[in-house]
């Protein structure tokens, strides 16, 4: 029961925090998600209510209430209702909640994934090529098949992902050469992505098996200062030494 309540709390807080951050970004860009409609006012009230309940609950269970209030000034300011002056503290509170939630763990796993097989270099290189290729297509095809920079980037993206909607197609020689390069890179990228996914889950399974077999014997060893590659080498060495004893 407690686990279910924690899960509901986690999901609710993440949704609220995500909405605050998203709405802030959208408003910063000059738009509004719901403008000043009844839906918007209802969501504002719900956010205020959830943050207030969460703050009061933590205050009640805190052993040193003065220290709690002193260390959570931003959280207190975040629950002051209907004032745009204190809206920034609500954003800070939302970011703090996201950092403490499971979203942070997801971010760590994503980072581990893109670092597998040095996939991060391939990913960043491919994204860079999308923008460079999009600009190149726009310059070569301007006024012919592509009429804006966004059209060029869109064409480069659907080409490099091998989707190829066909709504824009290069007609010039250099435009087609650019598209051919994007296609070849896209095929390589998808192959690298598939291989990285396989390697990631294989390594994860190996790590789980290692923990099951040897984890209890080496809990006192501090590996926090080592890189993933070094930790992997240490594990391989331990397995090798154990196999020799057999």
Image: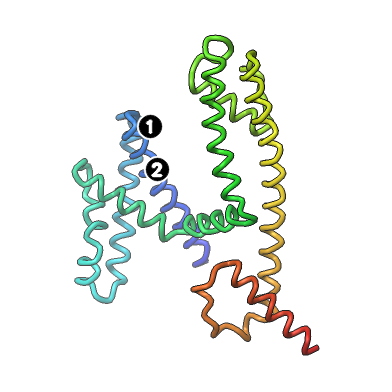
Residue at 22 percent across and 42 percent down: it is: 82
User: Residue at image x 54%, y 24%?
Assistant: 136
The answer to which of 24 and 2 lies nearer the viewer is 24
| Mark count | 2
Residue 241 lies in quadrant: bottom right
Q: Mark 1 points at which residue?
A: 33
Say what secondary structure mark 1 lies in.
loop
Q: Which residue lies furthest to the bottom in this view?
A: 245
The crowd level at tag 2 (other Cα within 10 Å; few <14, some 14-19, many 20+) is some
92 lies left or right of 174? left
Tag 2 and tag 1, C-beta contact below 8 Å: no
Earlier residue among tags 2 and 1? 2
Q: Where is residue 174 in the image (x, y as percent from the top left)?
A: 62, 19
- The answer to whether residue 38 is above or below residue 68 is above
State the separation of the CA atoms marked 2 and 1: 10 Å
Q: Where is residue 168 drawn, in percent x and y?
A: 61, 17
Q: Which residue lies furthest to the front in this view?
A: 174
Along the line of sight, the residue nearer the viewer: 175 or 221: 175
Residue extending furthest right? 246
Q: Quadrant of residue 87?
A: top left
Asked which secondary structure carries label 2, the reply is helix
User: Measured from the top left, where is residue 150 in percent x and y?
Assistant: 49, 23
Q: Where is residue 103 in the image (x, y as percent from the top left)?
A: 48, 55
In the picture shown, does residue 82 fall above or below 69? above
* Residue occupying image coordinates x 55% and y 38%: 127
**Is 228 situated left or right of 17 in this image?**
right
Numbered label attached to residue 194: none
Residue that appears at 29% across and 72% down? 62
- Quadrant including the C terminus: bottom right
- Mark linked to residue 19: 2
């Amino acid at each position: 029961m407690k686990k279910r309540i924690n899960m509901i709390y986690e999901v609710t807080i993440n949704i609220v925090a995500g909405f605050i951050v998203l709405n802030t970004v959208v408003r910063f860009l000059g738009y509004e998600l719901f403008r000043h409609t009844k839906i918007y006012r209802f969501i504002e009230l719900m956010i205020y209510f959830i943050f207030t309940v969460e703050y009061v609950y933590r205050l009640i269970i805190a052993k040193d209430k003065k220290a709690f209030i002193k260390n959570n000034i931003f959280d207190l300011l975040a629950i002051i209702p209907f004032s745009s002056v204190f809206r920034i503290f609500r954003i800070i509170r939302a970011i703090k909640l996201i950092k403490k939630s499971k979203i942070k763990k997801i971010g760590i796993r994503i980072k581990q994934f893109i670092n597998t097989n040095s996939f991060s270099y391939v990913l960043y290189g491919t994204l860079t090529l999308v923008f460079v290729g999009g600009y190149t297509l726009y310059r070569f095809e301007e006024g012919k098949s592509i009429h804006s920079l966004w059209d060029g980037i869109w064409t480069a993206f659907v080409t490099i992902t091998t989707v190829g909607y066909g709504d824009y197609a290069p007609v010039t020689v250099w435009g087609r050469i650019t598209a051919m390069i994007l296609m070849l890179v896209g095929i390589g990228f998808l192959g690298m992505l598939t291989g990285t996914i396989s390697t990631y889950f294989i390594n994860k399974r190996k790590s789980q098996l290692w923990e099951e077999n040897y984890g209890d014997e080496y809990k006192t060893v501090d590996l926090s200062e080592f890189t993933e590659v070094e930790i992997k080498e240490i594990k391989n060495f331990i397995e090798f030494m154990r196999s020799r004893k057999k």
